Image (spheres, rainbow, N blue to C red):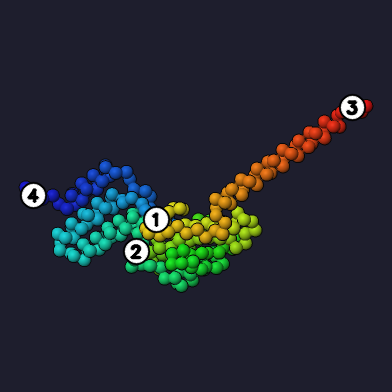
Amino acid sequence: MKTAPAWILLGVLLLAACTDHPAPAPAESASRPRQAGQPLDPLATAARMAAIRGAAARGDQQAVRQQMDAMSDDVRRTMRMPDPARRIPAEAAREQARTVAGVSSVAWVDATNLLVMVDGAQFRDYATIDRICMALEPLGDTLWVNIHLQNRRADTGDALEILSRNCQLPPGQRAFMQQQRRLDVVDPAIRAQQRAVQVRMRDAQARKAADDRANAEALRNIPEM
């Protein structure tokens, strides 16, 4: 019995992957950094396995190593583990971040947290974080970096609140073994409590003003003796 050609085996593998698993999510936009913490793409994994078998059959050890390294990188990114061989150089990253539109100053708080002051509320958003991360990508693995944005022109307590996110993860998530770092002087929970108290005080003042107007109207309507 003849062995099926390699391309037929690869086709069967890919067909099985498409049948057993949902289609992978669309590729990341060119304006956004590559995202970590995503499940392994079954189609890409099947293709890598087929490529490894094909390279091994040809005796191409370099291709085998390349595919194995790529598969290890996929697994590492799924586990949110930064690449230890591609740490972001601090000074080069600071200089690169300063070239992004709206950025006025940049400073490292520690080895993984970058504090960025922006020049206006219009730059304090996740799109600015994406642009900074894209600027850092040529320097290494941006999974190492957590960006913290603050508006240097803020004129209220709420406007001073810092916006934070890891370059490759959703807000609130951190890379493997990294600690959550909050740079706000006032804890967001305390700020929320203060806002709630202010709302209650405004409501109470509005009710008192309405009662005062009603009382004044009632007094005016009392007939003179």
The correct choice, above or below, for 40 with respect to 58 in the image is: above
Residue identified by numbered label 2: 83
Mark 2, mark 1: which one is toward the viewer? Answer: 2
- Quarter occupied by residue 78: bottom left
- Residue type at mark 3 is Pro
Residue at the image point whose x is 32% and y is 58% from the top: 76
Please name whichever residue, 19 or 124, is drawn nearer the observer in this view of the structure. Answer: 124
**Mark 2 or 4, nearer chain start:** 4
Measure the C-alpha gap from mark 3 to mark 4.
113 Å
- Residue type at mark 1 is Gln
**Mark 3 or 4, nearer chain start:** 4
Q: Residues at badges 4 and 1 in contact (C-beta under 8 Å)?
A: no
Residue at the image point whose x is 47% and y is 59% from the top: 181
Measure the C-alpha gap from mark 2 to mark 3.
86 Å
Residue identified by numbered label 3: 223
Measure the C-alpha gap from mark 2 to mark 1.
14 Å
Residue at the image point whose x is 27% and y is 58% from the top: 71
Q: Is residue 152 left or right of residue 222?
A: left
Residue at the image point whose x is 43% and y is 64% from the top: 112
The correct choice, above or below, for 97 with respect to 200 in the image is: below
Residue identified by numbered label 4: 2
Q: Residues at badges 3 and 4 in contact (C-beta under 8 Å)?
A: no
- Residue type at mark 2 is Asp
**Mark 4 or 1, nearer chain start:** 4
Q: Is residue 47 left or right of residue 143?
A: left
